[in-house]
Amino acid sequence: MIVVTGATGNIGRPLTRALAQAGEQVTAVSRHPAAVPDGVRHVVADLAEPAGLRPALAGAKSLFLLLSGDLHAAGANPAGIIAEAVGSGVRRVVLLSTQGVVTRPFGATRIAMRELEDTLRESGLEWAVLRPGGFASNALWWAESVRAQRLVAAPFGDVGVPVVDPADIAAVAAACLLEDRHTGGSYELTGPGLITPRGQTEALAAALGSPVAFRELTREEARAAMARSMPAELADDTLDILGNPSPAELRVSPDVERVLGRAPRPFADWAARSVDAFR
């Protein structure tokens, strides 16, 4: 059995579906009740209380670990989840980390994630670490304004980064959970090329078949909006990357293609598949 945390999100949902389609027994974990694919067991648990994962982990061979936003905050103890996995007899953990542990190793949230990576490596478990850059699905922040006003409001309109499709992250995660050859691997996951917020807006307009305007936010306006849904420190880290990406954060990684044998999907593909959220 494979346990998927964050199973109802942009990565967990396609990952759960892919594993079930591969014939695996899957337990989907989320904080709230939710619909899951036929044949998938669902367990409600809060990762902030690792002991609550024990019913989900009983009999599991592998775990996909995706931290909720509050587990990135000061005082959180995600290492307790690794301890629960060890105690439950789990054999393999695939951790969703972040590109920033390498590109910006001294930010507080990056230090905490690096420590969790180290805990996993030292746990005695089989492991793989996924380090994505920005997600294409972060464009969902704009869904309400696009629906209501045909408007995208975002900072750093002309700064591009190689955002990655969550479906590609899920596909890489599935490979790491199912294939022994990825044990001990750390994979940097990006899209196939740089795209700016203005470029994303154009892709959304093309998917919708109607014009979408772009308005550039100041950093302060963007931070205030983001801090409503994530720790302020994580919002600052994200804005640092979006506004002033380093050469490493501009690099297109070959790792999606190395694992999947195909190029990563461009943002336009994600926009076309997700267009209903913006109608």
Image (cartoon, rainbow, N blue to C red):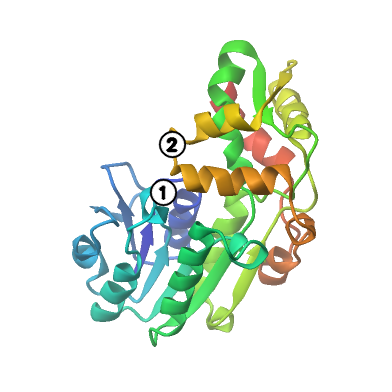
Looking at the picture, how far across and down is residue 137, in whole percent?
58, 41
Q: Residue at x 63, y 61 (%)?
A: 104
**Residue 217 in the image: above or below residue 63:** above
- Residue on which disc 2 sits: 229
Q: Residue at x 56, y 66 (%)?
A: 130
Do callouts 1 and 2 mark residues in contact (Cβ within 8 Å)? yes
Side of 240 relative to 170 (left or right): right
Q: Image quarter for residue 213?
A: top right
Give the position of the C terminus as an image quadrant. Answer: top right
Side of 64 relative to 82 (left or right): right
Q: Residue at x 64, y 67 (%)?
A: 102
Looking at the picture, how far across and down is residue 271, in whole percent?
66, 35
**Residue 29 in the image: above or below residue 176:** above
Give the position of the N terminus as an image quadrant. Answer: bottom left
- Residue on which disc 1 sits: 69
Front residue of 240 and 81: 240
How many numbered markers are drawn? 2
Q: Which is more N-terminal, label 2 or label 1? A: 1
Mark 2 lies on a secondary structure that is: loop
- Classed neighbour count for the residue bearing mark 1: other residues with Cα under 10 Å, few (<14), some (14–19), many (≥20): few
Label 1 to label 2: alpha-carbon separation? 8 Å
